[in-house]
Amino acid sequence: MVVRPARGATAVAAVTALSVTAAACSAPGGSSGGGKGRAGSSAVVGIAYEPDTLSPLLGYGKDGNSKIFDGLLTHDADMELKPALAAALPKVSGDGRTYTYKLRDGVRFSDGKPLSAKDVVFTYETILDKKTNNASKTELDAVDTVEAKGDDTVVFRLKYAYAPFAERTVLPIAPEHIAGKQDVNTGDFTTKPVGTGPYTLVKWSKGEKLTFKANPRYWDGEAKVRNFTMAIVKDDDVRATRLRSGDLDGAILPPNLAATFKSDGDKKTYAARTFDYRVVTLPTGNKVAGDTAVRRALDIGIDRKAMVDSILQGAGKEAYGPVPTDSPWFTEGTERMHDLAKAKKILDAAGWKTGKDGIRARNGVRASFPLWYLTGDKLRQDHALAYASDAKKLGIQIKVESGTWEVIEPRMPKDAVLAGGGSPADPDFDQYTLLRSSLAGDGFNNMARYDNARVDKALDAARRTDDRDRRKAAYDTVQRELVKNPGYTFLTHIDHLYIVGHRFGDLTTQVEPHDHGLASGPWWNVEKWQPAS
């Protein structure tokens, strides 16, 4: 799935932009004295984006690490599944279509009410309800029924054997006794959540910060970082400035800004390996970007290695699809080497002739289209400008524009977008919503309106079997088809860089998805931090 990291409709979406002035002046930790003046039991970190909702029924925390909620399962540092609200990993039937979970004893929501199997059933059934505005409900397509067996057992029955189903059960569980009494799409629960997680929400100041406090009822023990704040700082430069001034204890930063902290003895840099990619959507509805020859030419005409070296300063790798080259799911032989001469020949053969101004045209249509990126996102800006520069060498004019998601979204059917996505959990999580033709135009799913019958068939086959070899063969087909007709130009996979103060000790990171900063980073397990007093 190409996930927009900003705008106001999904868990990773952005928000009302935080102005530079407000960002520079606000002190979300309630102290003007900076990180050095805060007590060891408090932490303030800077992230780039905020959710539009805090309700898991609408998509918040669907990939885990929501802080306010828990799922039946969660991930450890190595991204292996382990029990959370469930007492153990699920029992799976021989045909792979029945998953049985036994709940952990003694778990309570932060309001004191006990967790029950009915809450699990309520959560999944509500998400699957057609009236619920959850753009990710297709991720639970395999679910046929969810049933409570007493108070402590939940049984999922699937329509077909769906290999990564257990990964879907990191999804946070909502309390029926609160969320079930409200309008799921507009009720107070969307901004005033109650969960079983290590933290409770104190206040959400839209566009500025999310303030949490440790949940004393947390089943795995009360967090020692008792006050935790996520400061929403959209602008990379402002986030770095606030970190440098001590207003933040930690922050996610692009490589060029992270490098400025190398000599800061009070801070440490953490690099998290990711599945996060940057990609240009090539909308089928655009006469230029939707042309197969133009797509193929751009695919080999852009210099991915130069982007890794100059924009990422080596903190990443070239991307040829949603699957990183070091993943076992990557299809060998689908790398696209930079070949400017070959790219020009593809355009020549397709009838795109170079004009006097150096821009190609065919049948009166100039080889020109807009490319949008999110305002304030330096990495996207740099990728967009590099892409346009490489395209110009081919005789393709790309007009780089910036805007908010509210500006960009209506233009997606015709205009290209510098987008992002990535999930390490399973290839189905990315590729189905990214490429399935039936999801074209469904919010931020299949943003390019990509339509390929062979890809559709392979995607369906891969999610409807638990045989790894058959799944690998299906995803090989998908990746090879993207070479023949790339509806997207994948550019880079990005390592996430975080700077955090030494007073929190040696921290860890996970292999991260595109949804970085909000629940990932070194604070993926902030409830386990051991801060110095």
Image (cartoon, helix red, strand yellow):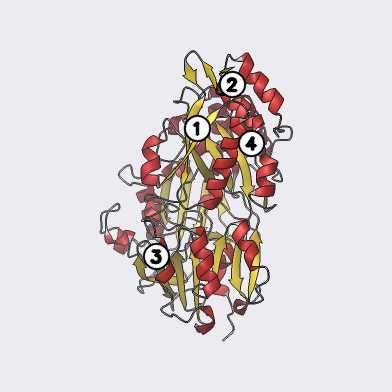
Residue 460: percent from the left, percent from the top?
A: 54, 32
First in sequence, mark 2 or 4: give its number: 2
Asked if residue 449 lies left or right of residue 454, the reply is left
Q: Is residue 250 visible?
A: yes
Asked if residue 342 lies left or right of residue 498, the reply is right
Mark 3 to mark 4 CA distance (whole Å):
50 Å
The image shows residue 63, relative to residue 508, as above or below, that is above
Asked if residue 26 lies left or right of residue 469, the reply is left
Mark 3 to mark 1 CA distance (whole Å):
42 Å
On the image, which quarter does residue 114 sit in? bottom left
Residue 389: percent from the left, percent from the top?
A: 59, 36
Neighbourhood count class around disc 4 (C-alpha, 10 Å): few under 14, some 14–19, many 20 upward: many
| Residue farthest right in this picture | 333
Q: Is residue 164 visible?
A: no
- Residue at image position (33%, 42%) is 130
Residue 280: percent from the left, percent from the top?
A: 54, 37
Asked whether the residues under the numbered discs 1 and 4 touch, taking CB atoms below 8 Å apart as contact, a structural biologist would say no
Give residue 293's mark. 2
Asked whether the residues under the numbered discs 3 and 4 touch, taking CB atoms below 8 Å apart as contact, a structural biologist would say no
Q: Amino acid at mark 3?
A: Thr
Residue occupied by mark 4: 471
Residue occupied by mark 1: 436
Residue occupied by mark 3: 21
